[in-house]
Amino acid sequence: MINNVKERNIDAMGPFWAYLVRLKPREQKLLPAPINDYNIPEPRYVRGTDGKFFNIRTNSIDEVAKVMIEERRTLDLRQKITNSEPVRTQNGVLEMEFSDYNPHARAEYLATQREVILAKEGYNLVFWISPEDGSVYLDGRFNIWFSKRINDNEYELWGKHLDLGTNRDDSLKLGKKLTELGGKALGVIDTVEDLRVQPVGFKVENLDNWLDECRKMMPEFESFWKFIENGDDIKQEEKVKKDVIEAKKIAKGDNIAFQREMERRGHEINKSGNHGSGYLGSENISVLNYKIQVIDGQFYTEPVYDKSGRLICPVCGAEVNGSSSICPVCKINFLGEK
């Protein structure tokens, strides 16, 4: 079970995992994706968070720092690179729980387990793309996973996670390009949703040369490769961690004060994003908990109202016209609204 995995390893996997809470699992399974190959076990689900990116009273320094980097407001996408420390399989699988707050949880779980399968087959450099979807995922992520064998059945995986600025069409083109270059996927990649569940693996003789492989396959992203080669993503991460530690001492448990102090230090983040919202610009929203439902392939949530009676989108915090049935910003549908 999840408790058998070291906490630091789960937390270190990146900002996505920072939004997972260790509560009782619930039955709802969002956006079904078939789990019927390679004996992949069913995922475990936990309740969604309170809709916030982080909570300095409960999240670790690493978790908060990764949120600050991934959700950073910047035109230089290299500043949004995050890193995952190694996690190990147990009994041949990565045992983890996924929050049902994320409508793509099942698909991302399937992709994660397929990364392990590719590792077992000798593919030690794996690319996995989680594309934007136009509603909940407002930007996509390009994940680079590395693996090494620990013993007969156990593997260690770690990675880097980038926002390349590609839209869903360009993401699909990139995924297909990787397979055309000889990458191995465990199924077809014909659509964006195929892409979300199909990591693409390569066998690299010397994993230390992975950047050279990236340059050959994706020269259009040279600015990212150079940034990483110089170690600038690691230097940036260490600076953000240092600022988080100092800002937490100043804030004394107040998340709003913390976010303001981080902004003062140059770390401005989005008001809302793929995995929640910040604490600034939405102080007047009275209800921040929300659940996303999928009806006929569309995303729905209950609308909420702030203290002034204005209709507010609980997902992104945008003010909505009272007669509207869809958020003008994140495009999620509202239940019961006409």
Image: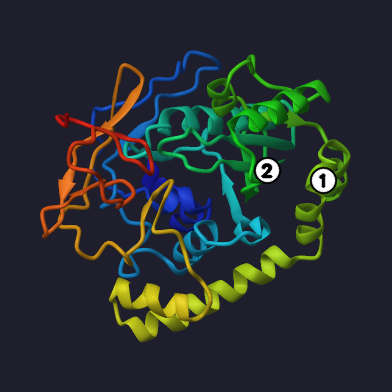
- Checking the image for residue 199, the label placed there is none
Q: Label 1 is placed on what type of residue?
A: Trp
Q: Is residue 331 left or right of residue 222?
A: left
Q: Nearer the viewer, residue 272 or 258?
A: 272
Q: Position of residue 265 (x, y in %)?
A: 51, 80
Q: Few, some or many C-alpha atoms within 10 Å of disc 1 (few <14, some 14-19, many ≥20)?
A: some
Q: Nearer the viewer, residue 142 or 187?
A: 142
Residue for badge 1: 210
Mark 2 and mark 1 lie on one chain; the one further toward the N terminus is: 2
Count the marks: how many?
2
Q: Is residue 221 left or right of residue 195?
A: right
Residue for badge 2: 144
Element assignment for label 2: strand
Looking at the picture, does residue 89 appear above or below residue 34?
A: below
Q: Label 2 is placed on what type of residue?
A: Ile
- Residue 60 lies in what quarter of the image? bottom left
